[in-house]
Image (cartoon, helix red, strand yellow):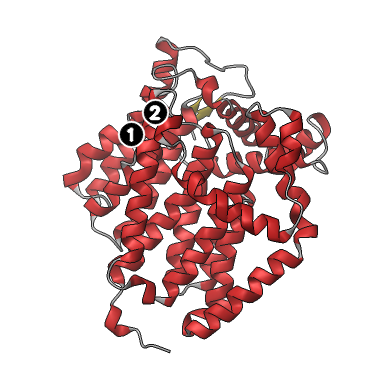
Amino acid sequence: MFFYSSGLDLFINEFGISYLVAEIANFGLLALILVVFTHYKVIEKDYFLFWLIYFLSPLFFNFILFNPYYFGDQYTYFDYFNRVKSTGLIEGLQYMDTNEGSFNEWSGIARSRSLFASYLLTFVPVFSVLTVTSLAFANKFLVLLLYIFLRKRFEAREIIAFLVIPSFILYTSLSLREPLIMFFGVISLILILENKPISSLACLLVLGVLKIQNIPGFMVIWIFVFLLRAQISYLRFSFYSLIGLGVIIATFGYYGDLINLYRVAFAMEDGVPLDEVELLEIQSGFGMVYTTIREMPGFLLAPLPWQVENPFQAIMSLESILLVVALCYFVLRKQMLSNRMLLIFVLGFGICMGIHALTTSNFGTLARYRFGGFFPFLIAFYYIYRTYRPHAETST
């Protein structure tokens, strides 16, 4: 990081020459890194042009396709990045606790997660952070690192097929934390599949701080694989799944208020009347399980074609349908359901998506939260699909 603004004193918040110069400099740094990686054969020469074009995408969203306030929390990450870069993480947290409300409040915890995400981005090379778009180039570098990680496991064209999913291009072209969430989510699931408990747990801990809603599903997978060894037999998997379901239902009183807090808050944000919002509150563990099963299909496919109101939602609708079809293809082909490891991942996926289905209602928020959890599982399911040999698994 060569140059950054201190707070908002050098902030450029309008499209113009200064804005373009700042962001072309960021693009130039990424291009230079790409040249170095290509020279040392970390990246194949055949895909040099693809990456060069891919790194340009942040220039075409903010101020071009939409007003950056459409994703208003970009400004939060910009501000927190500069704050933590100039003062450090601890002092940044202390400032927030003193001036922006106590961390004892739920909103304070949410802000601390945003500050932590911004802190992680300070370790990513970026030439300048002078505009709301600047951190998008840091996110593009994360995509490049993810590609390098996956390249040892997949063909280049297979990885690129995932990288050109419209939502992935969108969220990695903005100054958001979703790329960090997907980065650690993908790596943690792949490391679990490769039987690496310590490194996968380390990634999960980071993921848990970044996105607390995602962590239950991911941790269930880790616990089932490394502690319970549930993949050894169908009996083990079924037994521990039933025990887990019983625990979820029995302990609803301990976490139910948190689920209802999210559920009510997002409904009110979406304009649902107060008298109807109160009816959305879940009263029991059984009610939560039933509500999750009822709302999950709609969550995965939303917005449905008849709910579409603008071109962005039309693309989102088509994409969600195609992604669910792709996921079903990976899960249902080649006798995949006889793979006990896959069943554990399906369980974790259901928990992860179920939590989001329970708590989100606004299409914009829903799309971001859903894709941030969906994308890592999509790659994990493809990895299992690609490496699974039906006849190598013994029945138990």
Q: Is residue 254 left or right of residue 78?
A: right
| Kind of residue sitting beneath label 2 | Pro
Q: Secondary structure at mark 2?
A: helix
Residue 251 visible within the image:
yes
- Measuring from the top left, give residue 338's x and y in whole percent: 37, 77
| Quadrant of res 96 | top right
* Circle 2 Cα neighbour tier, 10 Å, few/some/many (<14 / 14–19 / ≥20): many
Quarter of the image for the C terminus: give it. bottom left
- Measuring from the top left, give residue 50's x and y in whole percent: 23, 39
Q: Are marks 2 and 1 in contact (CB under 8 Å)?
A: yes
Q: Is residue 110 left or right of residue 182?
A: right
Q: Residue at x 45, y 67 (%)?
A: 191
- Measuring from the top left, give residue 39's x and y in whole percent: 23, 47
Q: Which residue is mark 2?
A: 58
Q: How many marks?
A: 2
Q: Which residue is mark 1?
A: 55
| Quadrant of res 360 | top right
Q: Is residue 337 left or right of residue 51?
A: right
Rendered view: 61 above or below 326: above
| Kind of residue sitting beneath label 1 | Phe
Considering depth in this image, is 377 or 45 the residue closer to the camera?
377
| Quadrant of res 317 | top left
Numbered mark located on residue 392 in the image: none
